[in-house]
Amino acid sequence: MRNYPASLLDAQIHVDMLRRLGKVCKSRGEDGITISEQDTLRTRLEWEARSIRNTLLILGALTTRFGAGAVPLPGGCKLGDRSHDLHVMLLERLGARVWEEDEMLLAEAPKGGLVGTDIHLPIRSTGATENAILSATLACGVTRIWNPHIRPEILDLIALLRRMGAKIRVFGQEHVEVTGVEDLAGAEHRVMADNMEAITWLAAAVITDGDVEIRDFPYRDLEVVLAHLRAAGARLYPGDDSLIVRGGACYPIEISTGPHPGINSDVQPILAAWAAKARGESRIIDLRFPGRYGYAGEMSRMGLLYEVAGDMLKIQGSGGRLNGATVRALDLRAGAALALCGLIAEGETVITDAWQISRGYVGFADKLRNLGASVEWND
């Protein structure tokens, strides 16, 4: 894989999990990785370090290929009522028996392997769509995944699987049809650009009135959010493979998040930093994860005025009149959003638990310094 973000913390954890199973993973420079197999893989992932939700995808891959798998529960937490867990449901629909045992999630396929079926997802979940596609690639027969979340990352995964020999057809947002094959082969693939990072740098450039060119900008995947930001004052000039941001004014925004091609839930903390720079009231509603506004409390330590009314976050922007403070990165995007607020705040901003940012950004502090910010990263 090329254009691979090898230094991301979550990517490193995932690769280490593959190594624990027996895969051979070698870096290829700063943005490449080769994954190969020399010995028989283990089907039980023994893992004591920080867990990530990718363990669920590993379980699907192990079960469809070897007929059984065992992985730690994601995050070390119980899944709760199995009937509401999409990953358990889709594996059971394919014929597997799934159960919990000693903080592990185990799956076992019937004799002969998983069997193609119709899987109806009650919500358009990215992770469940990925797992259903992965699990169906080696299942016997045809699997149809209804109500999938067809977004750029899903199409990128499908492109890789097709190169490996999978038979997958996409029927828009209605369903995905996977015809099982006997095995998959190696392939070469260039990983798509990260649209969440792209939006982060776009917002950072506008709120600081910067003049920045963002190369490899995936603006064709971000048409909805770009339309909102243009209307909210951003001056944007797309090129063949880049986006030039010539600053602009930050006007209040009113957005609601939702499945692609709508505004991704991960974008809303970044847009909250935009709202902090604007003058007037902005309103944000997260339709996918209602109430995901914990970061606003951290921003309030810097002087942000906000109110949560039901499922809506209201931000009273003051033109960026924020003061530096010690704040905490509650998660990946919250950390990035706090950094954006720090760019326009008076004085010094200290972000604790900043390791969260490294889960999804390569060289975050270095890029900020190269853009003219005064940033110091302490591990």
Image (spheres, rainbow, N blue to C red):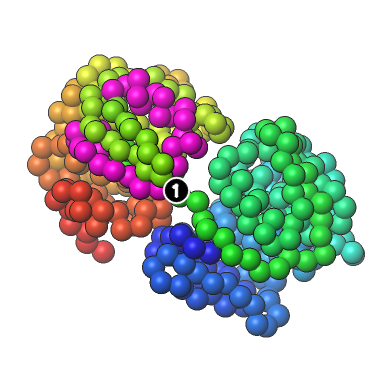
Position above or below: 243 against 282: below
The location of residue 26, given as percent across then percent down, is: 50, 76
Outermost residue on the left side: it is 347
Does residue 228 belong to the magenta stretch?
yes
* Three-letter residue code for mark 1: Asp
Please identify the quarter of the rendering in which residue 21 is found. Answer: bottom right
Label 1 sits on residue: 194
Outermost residue on the right side: it is 111
The 10 Å Cα crowd at callout 1, few under 14, some 14 to 19, many 20 or more, is some
The location of residue 19, given as percent across then percent down, is: 56, 75
**Is 8 or 288 nearer to us in this picture?**
8
The location of residue 32, given as percent across then percent down, is: 47, 67
Position above or below: 256 against 116: above
**Is 329 or 268 nearer to us in this picture?**
268
Please identify the quarter of the rendering in which residue 177 is found. Answer: top right
Q: Is residue 189 left or right of residue 340?
A: right
**Is 124 or 161 nearer to us in this picture?**
161
Tell me which residue sits at (21%, 38%) in the image: 211
Which of the image's four quarters has the C terminus?
Answer: bottom left
The residues colored magenta run 205-233
The location of residue 245, given as percent across then percent down, is: 28, 36
Outermost residue on the top side: it is 280
